[in-house]
Image (spheres, rainbow, N blue to C red):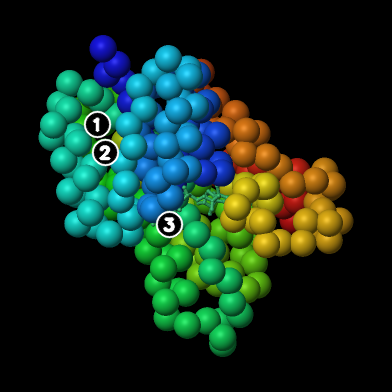
């Protein structure tokens, strides 16, 4: 029976989906969290099952603490023999505006999804992981959280907060064989970037292209692997040389 699981928040589409498939290739059963697009999440689950491992859909809003406790906490309670060995806090949204034009909902929803969502989910998973004395946590941040991007004060704050949390938690749990790292992508081709002017933006990317979700998933796969056991508390950029 499958008993080693990876939980990927926002696993239904984009980068999260590619990470689900990568972790399935590595032999993990995958818990595919998503917020509302069941069809997309079912497609991810089907791709995972093609790798001959288990996939379970887990619909909850990571920003809704009670929902996380009910759905994820309920699964953990009912599946005590199954261990969540890998957590990828990937769910995130952007809702850009210059600060004077930003409304409270734009600020709250972006912070609540990335930063609060990371707290809500990690809080449930971390103790069993520590008791198991093994784990891998990856927080999906952004170049925006490292250098700040105009029009994204909310998003830069959310991702910057996650970077601080990554470094602090890494130090708390290192002795338990748990690594905590962040991945900071630049521009990756997904639904999230579909509204951007790619032709214009690639001019400023040294690699002259957007990245793809599978490239981010390959990096996540390495950080999850046993070989990456001495890498913790780091932010790894994947941005085609864009960082400046
Ligand atoms: P995406 O294509 O828009 O997919 C987002 C996924 O997150 C979807 O599966 C969505 O669920 C889920 N989600 C959104 N809000 C959620 C919530 N409150 N609770 C649970 N699930 C939620 O995004 P992406 O481009 O793959 O981005 C993934 C992560 O990478 C995000 O954290 C993003 O900030 C980060 N990132 C992306 C880029 C980029 O260029 N794409 C660059 C830097 C960082 P539904 O399908 O149900 O809607």
Of the two numbered discs 3 and 1 on the same chain, state the one appearing first in sequence.
3
> Nearer the viewer's eye, disc 3 or disc 1?
3
Of the two numbered discs 2 and 3 on the same chain, state the one appearing first in sequence.
3
Which residue lies at the image location 27% right of the left edge and 18% below the top edge? 3
The relative height of residue 100 versus residue 13 in the rendered view (above or below) is: below
Residue at the outermost front position: 39
The residue nearer to you, when weighing 237 against 10, is 10
- Label 1 to label 2: alpha-carbon separation: 6 Å
Element assignment for label 3: helix
Which residue lies at the image location 33% right of the left edge and 53% below the top edge? 62
**On the image, numbered disc 2 is attached to which residue?**
126
Residue at the outermost bottom position: 100
Q: In screen coordinates, is 200 left or right of 228?
A: right
Q: Tell me which corner region of the image, top left, top right, bottom left or bottom right, holds residue 203.
A: bottom right
**On the image, numbered disc 3 is attached to which residue?**
114
- Label 3 to label 1: alpha-carbon separation: 23 Å
x%, y% of residue 82?
23, 23
Q: Is mark 2 within 8 Å of ligand 1?
A: no
Q: Is mark 3 within 8 Å of ligand 1?
A: yes
How many C-alpha atoms fall within 10 Å of the one at disc 1: few (<14), some, or many (≥20)? some
The residue nearer to you, when weighing 193 against 44, is 44
Residue 213 visible in image? yes
Mark 1 vs 2: CB contact within 8 A: yes
How many C-alpha atoms fall within 10 Å of the one at disc 3: few (<14), some, or many (≥20)? many
Mark 2 vs 3: CB contact within 8 A: no
**On the image, numbered disc 1 is attached to which residue?**
130
Which residue lies at the image location 60% right of the left edge and 52% below the top edge? 191
Q: In screen coordinates, is 137 left or right of 16?
A: left
Image quadrant occupied by the C terminus: bottom right
Q: In the rendered picture of this protein, how many numbered marks are placed on residues?
A: 3
Q: Tell me which corner region of the image, top left, top right, bottom left or bottom right, holds residue 127.
A: top left
Element assignment for label 2: helix
């Amino acid at each position: 029976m499958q008993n080693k699981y990876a939980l990927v928040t926002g696993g239904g589409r984009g980068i999260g989906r590619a990470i689900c498939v990568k972790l399935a290739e590595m032999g993990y059963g995958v818990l595919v969290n998503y917020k509302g697009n069941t069809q997309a999440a079912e497609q991810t689950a089907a791709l995972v099952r093609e790798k001959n491992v288990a996939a379970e859909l887990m619909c909850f809003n990571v920003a809704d603490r009670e929902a996380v406790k009910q759905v994820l906490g309920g699964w953990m309670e009912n599946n005590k023999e199954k261990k969540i060995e890998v957590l990828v806090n990937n769910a995130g949204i952007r809702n850009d505006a210059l600060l004077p034009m930003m409304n409270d909902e734009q600020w709250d929803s972006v912070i609540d999804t990335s930063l609060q969502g990371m707290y809500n989910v990690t809080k449930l998973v971390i103790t069993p992981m520590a008791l198991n004395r093994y784990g891998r946590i990856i927080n999906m941040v952004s170049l925006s959280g490292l250098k700040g991007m105009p029009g994204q004060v909310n998003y830069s704050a959310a991702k910057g907060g996650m970077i601080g949390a990554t470094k602090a938690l890494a130090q708390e749990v290192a002795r338990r064989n748990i690594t905590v790292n962040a991945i900071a992508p630049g521009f990756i081709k997904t639904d999230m970037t579909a509204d951007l002017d790619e032709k214009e933006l690639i001019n400023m990317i040294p690699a002259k292209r957007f990245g793809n979700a599978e490239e981010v998933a390959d990096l996540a796969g390495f950080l999850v692997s046993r070989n990456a056991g001495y890498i913790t508390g780091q932010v790894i950029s994947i941005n085609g040389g864009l960082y400046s």
